[in-house]
Image (cartoon, grey):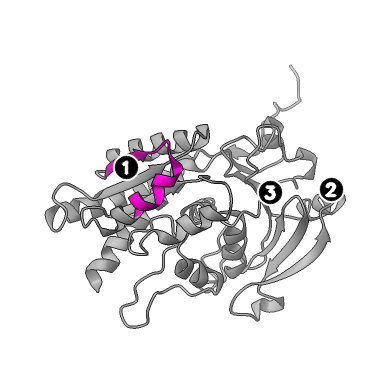
Amino acid sequence: MSNVAPLIKPGRTILASTIAKVYTQEIKDNIAKLKQTSHPNGPLLVGFLANQDPAAEMYARWTGKTAESLGVRFELRQFDDKDQLEENILTANEDTGVDGIMIYFPVFGNAQDQYLQQIVSIEKDVEGLNHLYYQNMYHNIRYLDDENKLKSILPCTPLAVVKILEYLKLYNSLLPEGNHLYGKKCVVVNRSEIVGRPLAALLANDGATVYSVDINNIQKFTRGSGLKFAKHHVEDLGDFSESLLKKLSLDADIIITGVPSETYKFPTEYVKEGAACINFSSHKNFNDDVKEKASLYVPMTGKVTIAMLIRNMLRLIENRNAK
């Protein structure tokens, strides 16, 4: 009989569906209350789709299926002509029967998409992309006003990653609120304006040192030594290089990827033993052997994102009712 112990992989793969269940009952309970008061048929979420992106179409199907399973009515409005989108969004803004609006990006794939984000009514913006929500997020302001304590809405995918980190117990609840990631080092490989940059800001505002990576350069997001600043500051570390990425990653507690490419893979040899790895891209950004290095691995975040999106909609309804 061999005295060699069987090889047991130390890490765990955690599915987004498992994490999303934490919020499912809370959402169902809140929707049940709405049905007894102001929304007898349940709230209505409208999604606008004007592209042929398979990832967007998949996200739309997930959104509809999840929303309806929780008691939310979901209506997907599809357009072959992208130029029809603006007028229809403005119509939905004025429709009192519509409680939440979302757009499946990219649409035009340029600055016009940012314009579309801003024409969605702030009271119906379930994705949290309105400039006021972004300004509050970047400046670490958590409420819309001091009088009613109405909570500001956070972008749903960055918020989903935060909730995943909380689920993984990487947030230290023994520390004061707002400092729960103090001492943690994170690498975020994506700096899009919708997910990567706001995510880096959120994590840094919660106390982490965050290295934000894109194809051009690497930036450091932090609240300074001893968290002396109220909000994050950004330092440019110079042009992107594999050697710098490797150095920073091997010292990171958390590695988060969101590269929208079928071919991109984050090098497993850059992952520190015991780090947590999370991928929010619709493509697998990690090779399967990452499970041999990472203590915790979340391969996709979509179902948590949808839960946060619906949670945002319920908060918007709550904010409207509180005014």
Is 1 on the left or on the right of 182, as rendered?
A: right
The numbered mark, 2 or 3, whose residue comes first in the sequence reads 2
The quarter of the rendered structure image containing the N terminus is: top right
Magenta span covers which residues? 73-89
Q: Crowdedness of circle 2 by 10 Å Cα count: few (<14), some, many (20+)?
A: few
The residue beneath circle 3 is: 275
The stretch drawn in magenta includes residue 26: no
What's the amino acid at mark 1? Ala
The residue beneath circle 2 is: 242
What's the amino acid at mark 2? Glu
Q: Crowdedness of circle 1 by 10 Å Cα count: few (<14), some, many (20+)?
A: many
User: Percent position (x, y) of residue 289?
Assistant: 71, 32
The vertical placement of 65 against 203, above or below, is: above
SS of the residue under disc 1: helix
Q: Which quadrant would residue 142 be assigned to in this image?
A: bottom left
User: Percent position (x, y) of residue 73?
Assistant: 25, 43
The numbered mark, 2 or 1, whose residue comes first in the sequence reads 1
Disc number placed over residue 67 in the picture, else none? 1
Q: Residue at x 53, y 54 (%)?
A: 112
The numbered mark, 1 or 3, whose residue comes first in the sequence reads 1
The quarter of the rendered structure image containing the C terminus is: bottom left
What's the amino acid at mark 3? Ala
222 vs 126, nearest the viewer: 126
Q: Crowdedness of circle 3 by 10 Å Cα count: few (<14), some, many (20+)?
A: many
Contact between marks 2 and 1 (CB within 8 A): the answer is no
Is 118 on the left or on the right of 313, as rendered?
A: right
User: Percent position (x, y) of residue 29?
Assistant: 24, 52
The CA distance from mark 2 to mark 3 is 19 Å
90 vs 216, nearest the viewer: 90
